[in-house]
Amino acid sequence: MMQPEGNCADRFEGVKDAFVQNFACGDEVGASVCVVHDEKVVVDLWAGAANPQGDPWQQDTIVNVYSTTKTMAAVCMLMLADRGMIAFDAPVARYWPEFAQNGKEGVLVQHVMSHSAGLSGFDSRVELEELYDWDRICNKLAAQAPWWEPGTASGYHALTQGYLQGEILRRVDGRTLGTFFKEEIADPLKIDFHIGLDTQHDHRVGEMVPPQVQLDDDSGTGKNIAARTFRSFSLTGREPQKRAWRAAEIPAAGGFGNARAVARVHAALAAGGALDGVRLMSSETTDLARQQQTNGKDLVLGVWMLFGLGFGLMNPRIPFTPSPGAYYWGGWGGSIAVVDPDTRTSIGYVMNKMGESTLGDKRSARLIDATYSALAQQ
């Protein structure tokens, strides 16, 4: 039986049991989970192997969390709004004038935040190396026409959301999103998460075990939004082994960290905007994250989604938690971040064995269920 390392409060022993069960079922290679409740770390566990060769997953092992990175980018954007540097109901072109090309004058920042800007993919296919060229990608997106009327429906912006957010941030702040995140969030909170990874951390990076299904055109030869989106790029799960991918700032998919980092950043939101004496934003701004923007069948994911500002919201069709006020997002392969202001709880889970689905994972579901069972105890 796998015995994880780390710490777990007695009340949350069920989370440890669920974590062990994930390994016992053969669903894991290496992973970490962290729960923060009332600003205190109550679960911080890691176990397994950091790579297929069997090197142990250490306390400081970090991995690429793919779209869980989007939650970190969202926190950056919420901080800009809190400082009055952007308004979510303002046109993107107010901050990025070139973006107004091809009928995008009315695209609002909140459309970017809620995957409803109509730019879920690229008009022409983008190869992996092109994703490392920030200006080239942003110029492409600025020149594109929306694929549907912005604001009328969500269509998951799997890669494009991070470039759109990052360029808005760069135009108003002057820094890249990765630098902003480091200087304004990671360093003050002393968390081990990176959007643009320095070579000094390479020895700590766990190796992903890719799924059988790649993120490319898995929708056949159709001309619908989902097919167009996934035809416009291709990811295999092997990108994190490339130094160029690690170094690039890809705020929608390229973040590296562990569960402790994921949970602690979101613990600040769950606690009203501050953690360990570091205030990221006001409690009023944290509430904006769960302000519903879209409600309907997502044009890319193909399932019913409710999006707030940068996060998915709870809905009966995807009951991630029993707490209606919680919000979340996860990454390709299975990683996840959950923020619950109602119980002042956050959950982070990351792993290196990637699951097949882009929508949820049974491993994180077990951990989330166990957390809420513990919270229900008196």
Image: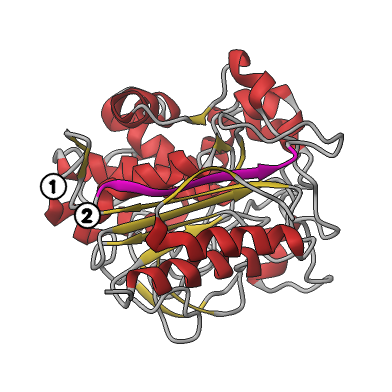
Q: Residue 209: horizontal and vertical position, in percent?
A: 80, 46
Which image quarter holds the C terminus?
Answer: bottom left
Which residue appears at 72% of the width and 57% of the height?
23
Q: Residue 141: horizontal and vertical position, in percent?
A: 53, 45
Q: Is residue 99 visible?
A: no
In front of the other: 116 or 292: 292
In front of the other: 344 or 86: 344
Give the label on residue 286, or none.
2
Find out whether the residues at labels 1 and 2 contact each other: C-beta distance under 8 Å.
yes
Q: Amino acid at mark 2?
A: Thr
User: 180 above or below 325?
Assistant: above
| Magenta-tinted stretch | 39-49
| Chief secondary structure of the magenta portion | strand
Asked where in the image residue 151 lies, by quadrant, the reply is bottom left
Which residue appears at 79% of the width and 36% of the height?
51
Q: CA distance from mark 1 to mark 2?
A: 7 Å
Q: Which residue is mark 1?
A: 282
Q: Is residue 87 left or right of residue 363?
A: left
Check residue 44 for magenta coloring: yes
Which residue appears at 82% of the width and 60% of the height?
213
User: 10 above or below 234?
Assistant: below
